[in-house]
Amino acid sequence: MSRRESIYQKAPALNTLGEGSPYVPHGSGKDMERFEVKRGLIKSMNGNAGLSKLATEFFNDVEVNADGIFVATFAILERVTAEYTDDDKLLVDVEQMKGNTLSEFLSKDGGREQALESRVRWSTFLDNATGYSSKQRGDKAKEGAKKISKSKSAIAMARKFMEISDSVTDEKKAIAEDLMIQIQQKLDEGNGTRALSLSEKLNKMFN
């Protein structure tokens, strides 16, 4: 990737700024990101209606669907959408220019400035939509990654223990399997906090 193509990105895993937790809705084939939201903010903003109103302050061509979820654009951001989820997270999806399209945009008069402005607007939007600064969002994402890692390890350790132990009853195995299904479901949803809580219950079964 050239220096110009990286003007908007800060070594992200996805096409956004990479400050949130990666999330791939089951069967969607789409990469998205989830962000922690400061307690009480979603209610004070009136949920997705307020989020869509906030979007008009930072992006162009804002359209809102029947569910109150907006889609917008700005400069190198070809498509921006975001929504508050039922578990009080911010779910975002950003498609930005890349390759020749991005190079052509940057070579135009004011292109580089517009690309930088895209980054500034996106970051400031996230500040307002989550209640956290860029650094705080990054820290929250790291915390979330640790929770996910611990939850996956709990599943792996439980399965290994059940394989090598002769003392685990069928009833206990059934309970453990049910817990592991629940943990995996929460991991698929991107809910690391709940997954970790369930994994702690799983760990206690074999400690």
Image (tube, helix red, strand yellow):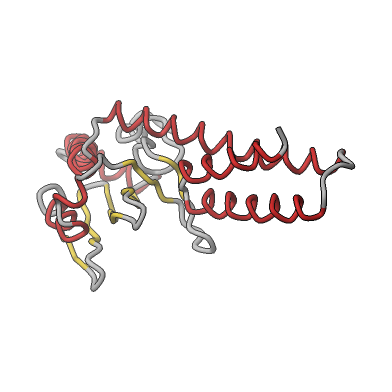
Residue 40 in percent (x, y) is at 21, 45
Q: Which image quarter is the C terminus in?
A: top right
Q: Is residue 118 above or below residue 45?
A: above
Residue lying at 23% horizontally and 61% vertically, measured from the top left: 70
In the rendering, at what x and y percent does residue 137 appear? 32, 33
In the rendered image, the residue lying farthest to the right is 166
Q: Quadrant of residue 142?
A: top left
For the question of whether residue 92 can be seen, the reply is: no
The quadrant holding residue 126 is top left
Residue at image location 27% in from the left, 30% down from the top: 134
Vertical order, 115 against 71 (above or below) = above
Would residue 199 be seen by someone viewing this image from the given angle?
yes
Tell whether 31 sits left or right of 68: right
Q: Quick check: 205 left or right of 142?
A: right
The quarter of the picture where the N terminus appears is: top left
Q: Residue at x 23, y 37 (%)?
A: 123
Q: Is residue 105 left or right of residue 188?
A: left
Q: How many marks overall?
A: 0
Q: Position of residue 199 (x, y in %)?
A: 59, 41
Q: Position of residue 133 (x, y in %)?
A: 24, 30
Q: Nearer the viewer, residue 109 or 181?
A: 181
Determine the residue positioned at 45% across, 36% down.
144
In-front residue for pair 36/182:
182
Furthest residue toward left: 57
Give whichever of 69, 199 is nearer the camera: 199
Q: Is residue 96 left or right of residue 62?
A: right
Q: Is residue 90 above or below residue 29?
A: above
